[in-house]
Amino acid sequence: METVAPRAHGVAHAVELVRELGGNAFVVRAARNGMQFEPGQYITVGLFGRIDAREYSVYSAPQDGFLEILVKEVDDGYVSPQLHSVRPGDILAIDGPFGYFTIDPEARDNRKFLLVATGTGISPFRSFVRAYPKLDYTLLHGVRFREETYEADGYDPARYLSCVSRGDGGDFSGRVTDFLRQSPVAPDTLCYLCGNCDMIYEAFDILKEQGVPPEQLFAEVYF
C-alpha cells in the first residue's frame, strides 16, 4: 500500500513528459526550477492543489536540466494514479530534497559498491550511476518479470544483473537474496539496499554473515 506524505505544499514544477515503461511503471519528468540535490535523496511529489503527496527518490542525475521520478501505479493508491494521468504542462507540487541515502565523496572513486534493488527501488541507483561515472559498482535488480527491468540498457551490462523471480528471462532465476547467498560479497564492499523491507532485512542478515560490517550497510525502504 502507498504511504502518504503530508499534503502537497511544495514548489510548482511543470510536467515536461511522461515516459511509459510497461507493467504500470512510468517516468515523470518535470522542470527542475534550479532544485539542487545529491544522488540518493528523495522529494515529495503531488498534483498542485491536491491534498496528497508521496515520497520518491530522484531518478535523474544532478547534471540533468530536469527532475525525473520512477513511479509504479499502485492499486488503490492515492498519488500514483494521479501521476499516471498527468500530461506536459500540468503542475506538480514538489518539495525537498530530503534524506541521507548518499555516497561519501571520499569513497566514490576508491571503494567497491554493491547496489541491491527490488522493483522501483532501483531509482536512486540510476542517479548514482549517472552522476558518478567512475563508480566501481555491481547492481542487482530484483523483479518478478523480465519486463520490469526498467531501462536496464542505461547501465553497464558488465555491472548490471537482473534477478527474475517469476517467468523466463533475466540474468539470474530467483530473488536477489538467492543470488547473494550463492555469490558472497567481499567484506570491504559498501552495500546499498533499496526496496521492500523483507528483502532488506534478509539481505542485511546474509551480508553480515558474509563478513560485511554493519557500518558498511546502508538502506532505503520502499513500501
Image: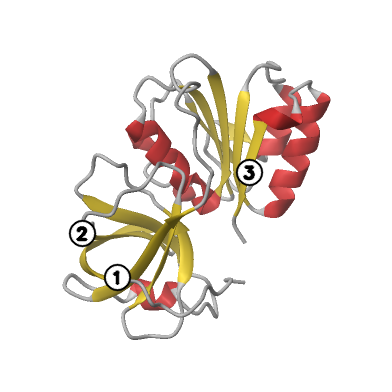
Check residue 87 in the rendering and tell me which mark sits there, or answer none: none
Name the kind of residue labelled 2 in the image.
Asn
Q: Are marks 2 and 1 in contact (CB under 8 Å)?
A: yes
Check residue 33 in the rendering and tell me which mark sits there, or answer none: 2
| Mark whose residue sits in front, 3 or 2 | 2
| Element carrying mark 2 | loop
| Mark whose residue sits in front, 1 or 3 | 1
Pointer 1 residue: 11
Q: Earlier in the sequence, mark 2 or mark 1?
A: 1
Please tell me which residue is depicted at 58% across the width and 71% down the height of the picture.
3
Q: Earlier in the sequence, mark 3 or mark 2?
A: 2
Q: Nearer the viewer, residue 175 or 121?
A: 121
Mark 2 nearby-residue class (10 Å; few <14, some 14–19, many ≥20): few
Distance between the alpha carbons at the discs numbered 1 and 3: 28 Å
Name the kind of residue labelled 3 in the image.
Ala
Please tell me which residue is depicted at 45% across the width and 74% down the height of the picture.
53
| Element carrying mark 3 | strand
Pointer 3 residue: 219
Please tell me which residue is depicted at 63% across the width and 20% down the height of the picture.
189
Q: Is residue 214 left or right of residue 140?
A: right
Distance between the alpha carbons at the discs numbered 2 and 1: 9 Å
104 vs 149: above or below? above
Q: Nearer the viewer, residue 77 or 216?
A: 216
Q: Earlier in the sequence, mark 1 or mark 3?
A: 1
Mark 3 nearby-residue class (10 Å; few <14, some 14–19, many ≥20): some
Name the kind of residue labelled 1 in the image.
Val
